[in-house]
Image (cartoon, rainbow, N blue to C red):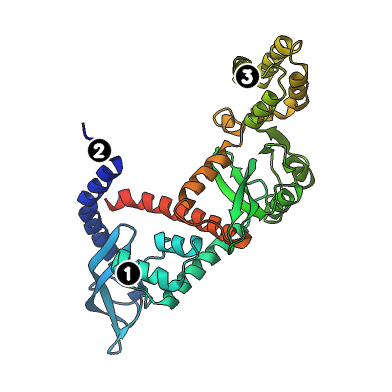
Amino acid sequence: MDQVSLSDIVTGAWEEIKGYVLKALKEAVEAVLLEEQRKVLGRGRYQRGGSRGWRWGYRQRKSFLTPWGSLEGLKIPRIREEGQEVSWLRKNERMLKELGEWIFSAVVGGMSLRRVSSSLYLLLKDSLSFSSISAMIKKAHSEIEQKRARPLRRAQYKVLVVDGVMVTFRRGYRRRKGVLLVAVGVDEEGEFEVVDWEVRRREDFEGYYVLFNRLYERGLEEVELVVGDGFSGIFSAADFVYPFSKRQLCLVHLAKNLERHLADRSLANRRRLRKEFWWIYEAVSREEAMRFYGAFKGRWQQRETEMVALLERYFPLTIAYYACPRQWRHRLRTTNIVECFFRNLWRFMGRFPGFQDEEHSCRVLGTYLLGVERYKKAQEVLPYAL
């Protein structure tokens, strides 16, 4: 039996409904334009008062690019005042200020403006001047910086989940290593978002201190819990900036570390350790987890003294997440929130050569986050347009 590609089916289905979407979008846009014209004039049709301007028919826009395709023959209302047309819409607005693939290519891939322009023409059958492309890219960079610098409330996030991932910089023929540090904030409802990031030569106390301190200076002065692997200076940096917050050690990192300290490292013994270790944290309360931990120690103490001693040392840092609401506290047992973000980022980055240097990697991450944000907004608008 021949297999069918899901992506081909989705693409085909989209092509079938694309016409209906664009038709509905065009009607909605033209209705909004008429409403905006009424606001500018200060009166409705066949009414008196308002400004001295008058309705003056329509002009047609050949095409206007949207995230769902090109709107053809868009009717734009005109306004006349003292015998001349009044400009009430921005001039030279060639397309929506949405981040598309060409912005990603320009920022992430380091493409020249000439290559971006030629790619746009091949992709969209439309061309933009170099100055227009440059202005849009600069605007995107400005939005990225504004996103990183936006003020935060004193206790806007209850939890900070922090982790780092190794990256390679490809400036010229030289390749060198670096690390991308990311902080994800979790609010009272359990919703989370990337709030800041830092690119350093290595994952250490200094990098995490700069990251935490910038969040503090932006207004996030109180955090109840900091989640991290605990082995890269995360908690030491948090002690300086958020000394009164609790610490939650990533259970995945700890479990792997415990395996390395087993005297008997056979597959069967490691599997048994994993099963019994995670059973501790299936408890519904902190007190029950402590009882499970006591039973675990009784079973392993005699033959795996070193491993049990390591767990005993870190155990107080593994149950701090129980203080969070039960509905979403399970997300805070590990740094999976950040690591899932890294996986999506690398899936996106697989289409491009990679990072050039520290500054470029910061722009890439910011551009990716802006793209995700714009995509979510577009998804919210699409059902309405349908």
- Which residue occupies 45% across, 60% down? 104
- Under circle 2, the secondary element is loop
Which residue appears at 21% of the width and 58% of the height?
23
Q: Which residue is mark 2?
A: 4
**Vertical placement of 147 versus 265: above or below?**
below
Q: Quadrant of residue 65?
A: bottom left
- The answer to whether residue 350 is seen in the rendering is yes
Q: How far across and down, in percent of the image, does residue 329 sit?
A: 59, 31
Q: Label 2, label 3: how many angstroms apart (C-alpha)?
A: 41 Å
Residue underneath mark 1: 121
Residue 1 pos. (x, y %): 21, 31
| Amino acid on which disc 1 is placed | Tyr
Q: Is residue 35 visible?
A: no
Residue 21: quadrant of the picture:
bottom left
- Tag 3–tag 1 contact (CB < 8 Å): no
**In the image, which is nearer the foreground, mark 3 or mark 1?**
3
